[in-house]
Amino acid sequence: MTTGIFADYLRRLGITGPHTPSAEGLFALQRAHLERVPYENIDIQLGRPPGIDPELSARRFGAGRGGYCFHLNGGFAALLEWLGYDVTRHVGGVYEEADVREVNGNHLALSVRVDGEAYFVDAGLGDGPYEPLPLREGSYEQGGFRYRLERLEGPEQGWTFHNVGGPFPVMNFRSAPATMADFADEHLRLSTAEDSPFIRTLALLRRDATGIDLLRGRVLSRIDAEKGPVERELGGPEEFFDALEGVFGRKLDDLTPAERTELWDRVERAHEAWLASQQA
């Protein structure tokens, strides 16, 4: 990748000047990434899913876009390597059930070794840790949110990340290194299959030091560990697009007027269907 791609990427993160790999630097990079590059599936909703080549993802981030885990962690891993970090990619799996011990391949996880310590690093969960966690068994708390790491034993040798109280309380990942090619088939399924959650529902997430901003369809939520969630329904397209840019930092200059209309109409139809299901 060219230096210009990473320069734009770092500007998006608000990070300038020379960078020497360190634990402190790694923590700052993950915090900035979660705050400024949203988890989002706008292009998938519009039927134009971007590929997961790390260079493409890095270009998109520099231009104000986001993505989901294969984009976010794929691009972030490339940036970290360019900065001199020792990065390993891992095949992972995210689950709604807390007792699952398999790995289905629907998540890309990262580990990074720096200053003699290995860290679990993830910019692609949406509601994951604000800062890296030491890659060792234990319980951790950040801003009132509680997490736990434990060894994953059995056929799938690796780690289990517990997101206590989250909608997906478990993410398992293998210790073995992976390449981006290992995620190609699952990316195709997630970005095109009718039963994929990325096809069914528009979703954006942004993490900061005190909580999580979440948009699902027309419902905007703020999740605070101490106060709990506060949500409201966005009233119309103007409020909706203002939230995409103002809350989540997702630039919309790549959307034509027709695509804005298409996106809003899709979100509105899904919202009405969801309301009808609640009343059934």
Image (tube, grey):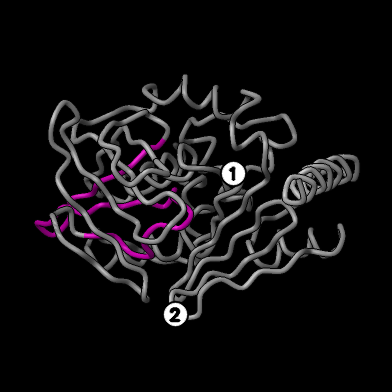
| Kind of element beneath mark 1 | helix
Label 2: few (<14), some or many (≥20) within 10 Å? few
Residue 88: quadrant of the picture: top left
Determine if the magenta segment contains residue 197.
no
x, y percent for residue 92: 33, 36
Closer to the camera in the image, 75 or 161: 161
Q: Quadrant of the C terminus?
A: top right
Residue 181: quadrant of the picture: top left
Which numbered disc, 2 or 1, marks the residue closer to the eye? 2
Name the residue beneath numbered marker 2: 226
x, y percent for residue 166: 43, 57
Identity, as a three-letter code, of the amino acid under mark 2? Glu
Name the residue beneath numbered marker 1: 60
Q: Is residue 201 visible?
A: yes
Measured along the vertical axis of the image, is residue 129 above or below residue 185? Answer: below
Q: Is residue 26 visible?
A: no
Question: Which region shows up in magenta?
Answer: 107-133
